[in-house]
Amino acid sequence: MKILSIALNTFRENLRDKLLYNLLVFALLMIGSSVILSRLTLGEFHRLILDLGLGSINFFGILIAIFVGIGLVSKEIEKKTIYTIVSKPVARYQFLLGKYLGLTITLFVNTVVMALGLLVVLSAQAVPIEGLLFKALALIFVEFMVIMAAALLFSTFTSATLSAIFTLALYVIGHLTADLKTAGAKMDDLSRGLLNGLYYLLPNLERFNLKGHVVHHLEVSGSDLLLIVAYGGAYTAFLLFLASLIFHRRDFR
Amino acid sequence: MTPSPDLVVQTDQLSKIFRVGFWGKRVTVVEGLNLDVRRGEVFGFLGPNGAGKTTTLKMLMGLIYPTSGQAWLFGKDLGDPQSKARLGFLPESPYFYDYLTSREFLRFYGHLFGLWGAALDKRIDELLELVGMTPAKDLQLRKFSKGMLQRVGIAQALINDPELVVLDEPMSGLDPIGRKEVRDLILRLKESGKTVLFSSHILHDAEVLCDRVAMILKGRLVACGRVTDLLDEGASHPVELVVDRLTQEGLAHLRPLADKVVVQGDRILIVLKSQQQVGAALEIVRAAKACLVSLNPQKGSLEDLFIREVEGHRSSTER
């Protein structure tokens, strides 16, 4: 119950923040502009709208996840609001999970709005809407959840700026982990072991990317989808657990 | 040491060392602090800026962890949810959530204590009334002045009707009217049987309000006790004697008793070294047939005590 109260409070606070609306407007503009851009291409215009639309949702969602995520805890400490909460009968992990859940709700609403924007554009352009599209959107959201947890984890022990850089780095590396394995295969045992270790430790964010599947109409089975969602959930839980551990030991100076 | 159930706050050799800078230099902020706050009293925690007051309060509130030593609230270890439920805390210069109205803000804190619905709304109305914020109840907090934020902050600290109210510098940054209101509020809390622990560097407030005070300097306790006892403890108090038409002979007799003599025409001001000299001095005045204008014991203030302690500390560290 306490976690939910903190989550709803975070959600309410986010809703009244202008940053969010700015990002949302940009995202919708970007999705809309895919119509104009598609005019410049020959024949492939369905693909372009889908690719650009999903890409925009992904990009702006990640921006929100990172830039709101890093501020969740650091802003509370900076503004000393956390003093009044931790001194109440609220465990620190409850506070952390509440903040995380609050941002999840915020981002969920945003994703739904952006997805509706895309659906409007698609139907206006008479692009057939497949079930696969919703699977792709669901996985984009799972990726947001991983990135939010990472931003939260970094912000429990370092400054907002460094947290943003770390999270962004994790995002980029997370999409290139397959290359780690490929590179390792050509190296000596030690390097290969090291790169393989990194491959398994870092999140494999490319798994959440179904844009190619949507554009090229490659179906993804339900069991595969479930497995990917479970992977995202487990990774998120792992990051949140680490964040709670660090947050529990922290002094609020 | 075992915690006493009669004490609301108790600390035993509480210490905090911070590590600062790149090399993790150790800075002792609080050292070997022993405090006890009894049920129903107003306890002032005094010291200059940077003495370690806020750090101590933060340790008690579970915001930072002590490096060594122990502390208990209501006889329970720090961080115990049951004792937290009986506690209200106002941090120093709080900001709170900009985009909430004072009602939403208080409702949120009520939820954290498991308060919901009509009972909570009633409590919020009472509190807004108590701190005089009813007219601004639907205004967002970012539009509030510092004094208004402080009042909502106090309301927040009282939402659960706590037995112990801890206020960190509740008077700082407020205008004289605001300070008086906070003082009145503290007295009202005491009347309703609550224990109040507050920190301050404004000694006058503490002198008026507190049953007992503790004074800390560089993280160490330098004085603790009832305000009156502390004031009596500090050296003998001088007494100011003003007389008219004192003869030269009378003055000559008085001089050995006096610290300072100021002659202004007919009127003479004599500062006696201590109360013990008053009897003898009055004898001389009567014998000289002079006219006694006034006799004023110079009451010591916490401020004097404070300055003495600070200077004492400085000279001891210079040695």
Image (spheres, rainbow, N blue to C red):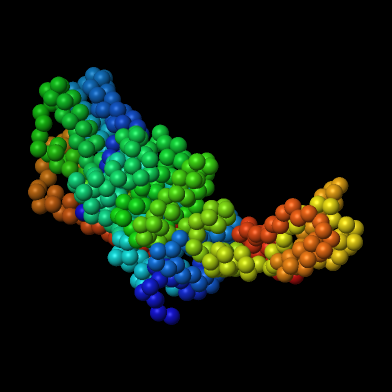
Residue at 27% x, 48% y is B123
Q: Is residue B253 above or below residue A99?
A: below
Name the residue nearer the viewer: B117 or B212: B212
Residue at 28% x, 25% y is A29
- The number of discs equals 0
Name the residue nearer the viewer: B297 or B165: B297
Residue A169, visible in the rendered structure:
no
Q: Give the quarter of the image for residue B248.
A: bottom right
Name the residue nearer the viewer: A172 or A245: A245
Residue at 17% x, 55% y is A230
Q: Please indicate whether residue B205 sits to the left or right of residue B289 in the image.
A: left
Residue A148, how many percent across, how many down? 30, 48
Residue A151, how many percent across, how many down? 35, 49
What quarter of the picture does the C terminus of chain B occupy?
A: bottom right
Residue at 14% x, 42% y is A135
Outermost bottom residue:
B1
What quarter of the picture does the N terminus of chain B occupy?
A: bottom left
